[in-house]
Image (spheres, rainbow, N blue to C red):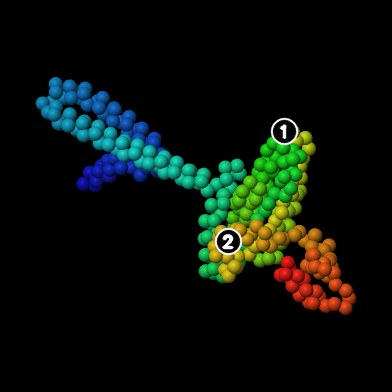
Amino acid sequence: MPMLQRAANTVRRFIHPAVPEEELGTHARRYHTLTLALLALAVPLELYLAWRVPIPGLALLLATCAALLAAERGRELSWRERQQAIESEVERQADALLRDGQTGLPNRNYLIDQLTREIARAERYGTTLTLAVIELARADELQRSWGGDIVSRAAVHVAETLRRVTRASDFLARLDEQRFAVVLLECTREQAVRFADRITLAVANRPLEPAGRQRVPIYIAVQVRATQFERERFRGPLDFISAAGGDVVIDPPSARANETVDVRAIRRRALGDLPSVDSTQEFADAWRAYRARRRLG
């Protein structure tokens, strides 16, 4: 009895083996070959048994059943292989719709999906979420000076640099031809400043290598802007992305250290085309007079 059980298990494993998905094609071809071999053996076996044993019908039946069984198993494996190929192609096309063809980075649509998930997570757990936008600086000047595909090459160059300096937990995407976005998880304003400084220095210290008309290395510059998500300000990822383009401009620390505050200059910029006031007239009076003239005009 144990011998019969082992034989049955062997036959079962042969008929329905545990086939890995990547080996379906190989097993299907083996079963097709076995089918042809069984069919080729059925004819001479029938002739031999018809001459030696008076039960040729049984031999023919066994051979035919074995051949049909092998053929059916081969068709099943072939169908599974085709299904796997179709699913792989669908996944490849879906991934292509969510990625930038030039850099391989996630595109704007992918960024929106990712932001939707991260915003929900930040609201649920009360964590901070910052969106940094990196823009290629002086792109028009680059195009006028060098022409050709210099802007595209510079964008690819910036993308490669961003890949090297961003954290594994951050999400890097390409917004358009000249702009990239990085979703910074659990990032405070001070950390965003350091991130901006690191990005700016990394791009500035890595020139674009010569190619085509370009005979010398070109140093690329970027501008970094960052916005922290606030539930009261933004209704969703689209509002967040729109505001991130110009909400908070993060200058490098070196530039901020040398900046001095001139109250008089700030007041002059605020006044703009306001009429000058003498030393005896209060600023509030001048402002009211100016607004009255604007309304009358």
Q: Which of 44 and 98 is in front in this view?
A: 98
In front: mark 2 or mark 1?
A: 2
Could you say whether the residue bearing mark 2 is in a helix, strand or loop?
A: helix
Please say whether residue 45 is visible from this viewpoint: yes
Residue 65 shown left or right of residue 116 in the figure: left
Residue lying furthest right: 279
Specify the amino acid type for callout 1.
Answer: Gly
Q: Is residue 278 above or below residue 240?
A: below
As measured in the structure, the alpha-carbon distance from the residue carrying label 2 to the one carrying label 1 is 41 Å
Q: Quadrant of residue 24?
A: top left
The answer to which of marks 2 and 1 sits earlier in the sequence is 1
Q: Quadrant of residue 156?
A: top right
Q: Mark 1 points at which residue?
A: 212
Q: Which quadrant holds the C terminus?
A: bottom right
Residue lying furthest left: 54
Percent of width and height locating residue 97: 51, 46
Residue at 52% from the left image edge and 56% from the top image edge: 113
Q: Nearer the viewer, residue 144 or 132?
A: 144
Residue lying furthest front: 296
Residue 109 shown left or right of residue 259 in the figure: left
Q: Which of 180 and 146 is in front in this view?
A: 146
Mark carried by residue 77:
none
Q: Quadrant of residue 223?
A: bottom right
Residue at 55% from the left image edge and 60% from the top image edge: 237
What number of labels is visible?
Answer: 2
Q: Mark 2 points at which residue?
A: 239
Residue at 78% from the left image edge and 77% from the top image edge: 284
Label 2 environment density (alpha carbons within 10 Å; few <14, some 14–19, many ≥20): few
